[in-house]
Amino acid sequence: MDYELIALLMFSSMMLLLLTGKRVFGAIGFVAVAAALLLWGDGGSEMAFSAAMKLMKWYPLLTLPLFVFMGYMLSESGLAEDLYKMFHVWMGPLNGGLAIGTIGLMVAISAMNGLSVAGMAIGASIALPELLRRGYDKIMVTGVIQAGSSLGILIPPSVVLVLYGMIARQPVGQLWLAGVFPGLLMAGLFILYIAVRCRLQPELGPALSAEERGQISRREKLLLLKAGIAPLFIFFCMTGLFLMGITSLVESSAVGAAAATLMALVKGRLTRRVMEETLRKTLGISCMFMWIILAALCFGAVFDGLGAVKAIEAFFLESLGLGPWQVLILMQLSFIIMGMFLDDTAMLVIVAPLYIPLVGALGFDLVWYGVLYTITCQIAYMTPPFGYNLFLMRAMAPPEVSLRDIYVSVTPFVLIMVLALVLVMVFPQIALWLPQWHYGR
C-alpha cells in the first residue's frame, strides 16, 4: 500500500469516527496512534509521547488558562453586567443605540475571554431580554448578538489563535496582535450597518424615551461609566504593559487574571460560589484544548511523516494546475462547508496537517493565514443549516424567537464578515502591520 493511500485511509477513518459523535481529541488521537503503531511498530508510540512533551514544554500555553480564568471571573462576578448598564445608559438615546452598545459589550467580553460561547451566553442572558423589552426588532437583535459573540475567537486573547499557533508553530503574540485590527474592523462594520439601518428604519431600534432619559441623573451616569470602565481598564493596562515591553505575553495574562480577581474582591463579589464556578469552567476549557492540541500534534507528525502534504501540494498545483490564490480560496470555502457541521477546533485539527504546510509552500504568511482561518470560522459559525452559533442562540433565546428568525437574522452579518474577509485578503497589512511594528522595534 503506497503512502498516499495510507494518508487517505487515515483521513477518512478520522472523519468517520467524528461522525459517530465521539470527542474530537479521542477520534483524532486514536487514528494517529493506531496508524503510527501499524506503520512503525513499537517505535511509533514515541510519536504520541514526543507530542505530549512538546505540549508540556510550550511556554505560551500558560496564557490559555490564565486568560480563560480572567474572562470567567469577570463574567461570574457580574462585572460584565456593569459594562452593559454603562452602554445601555450612554448609547440608549440613539436609534439603534442599545444594539450598538451590545456590539461594544461583545468587543469588551471578547477582549476578556477569547471564547465566542462566553459572549453568546452574556449577550443572550443580559442584552437580548432588555432589547426585546425596549421594542427592538427581534430578528435584528438576534443577529447582533450572534455576530458580536463571534468576535471572541478573533479579538485577543483568542483561544482559537492559541490553538492555531501551537499547531502551525507560529508565535501567539504575533497572532493576537494580527487579530486586533481585523476584529475592530469587523465590529466597526457591524456598528455602521446597525446605525444606518436604524436611521432608515427607526422602528427597528427605538431610542430611549425622553422620560426614561430624564430618570437617570448625571451623577448616576458617571457612576455607571466608572463601573463599566473598570473591566476595560484591566484589559488596556494588561495590553499596554505587553506592548511597552514591560511584561511578556504570559506575564500579561497573569496580570489580567490577578487584576480581575482583585476587582471582584474590591467590589465584594468574590464569593465562594464565584471562585468555584470560575475555577471549574477554566479547568474544563483548558483541559479540552490541551487534549485537542496533543491529538493534533500526534496526527500531524504521522501525516507529515507519510509525505501526504507533498502529495496534496502536487495534486493542486500540478495535476489541477491551480494558482496559489485559487488554492487559498478553495481552502476557505472548505472551512465554511465544514463549519456547517463542526466547531472551530475540530475544523482546524482536521485540516491543519494538510493546509498549514501547503499555505507556507504557496508563499503565504502563516500569521496572516491564521487571521483568515479565524474570520472564516466566524462565518461558518453563522452559516445555516448547522452553524454552531445558530444552535447556541436557539438554546438560549426566549420562546418568541423561532429558529427561522435566527436563520434570517444572520444574513446581513454574514455578508459583512465576507466583506471583512475579502478586505483582509486583498490588504494583508490590516492584519500584519501591528505585529510587524511591535516586533520590529
Image (cartoon, rainbow, N blue to C red):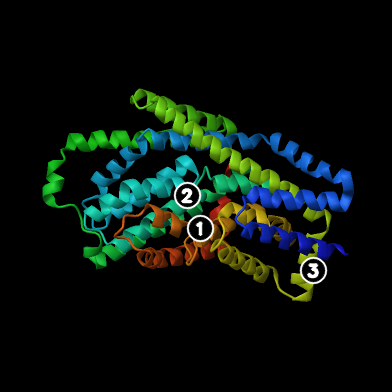
Q: In this view, does 286 lie above or below 317?
A: above
Which amino acid type is marked by label 3? Answer: Ala
- Answer yes or no: do the residues labelled 1 and 2 have beta carbons within 8 Å? yes
Residue 140 visible? The answer is yes
Upstream in the sequence, badge 2 or badge 3?
2
Give the quarter of the image for residue 66: top right
Q: Where is residue 169 in the image (x, y as percent from the top left)?
A: 70, 46
Give the Cα separation between the discs numbered 1 and 3. 30 Å
Which amino acid type is marked by label 1? Answer: Gln
Give the quarter of the image for residue 137: bottom left
Q: What element carries label 3?
A: helix
**Residue tagged 1:** 378
Q: In this view, does 223 lie to the left or right of 420?
A: left
Q: Neighbour class for label 2 at 10 Å: few (<14), some, many (≥20)?
A: many
Q: In this view, does 430 lie above or below 314?
A: above
Q: Is residue 317 above or below residue 358?
A: below
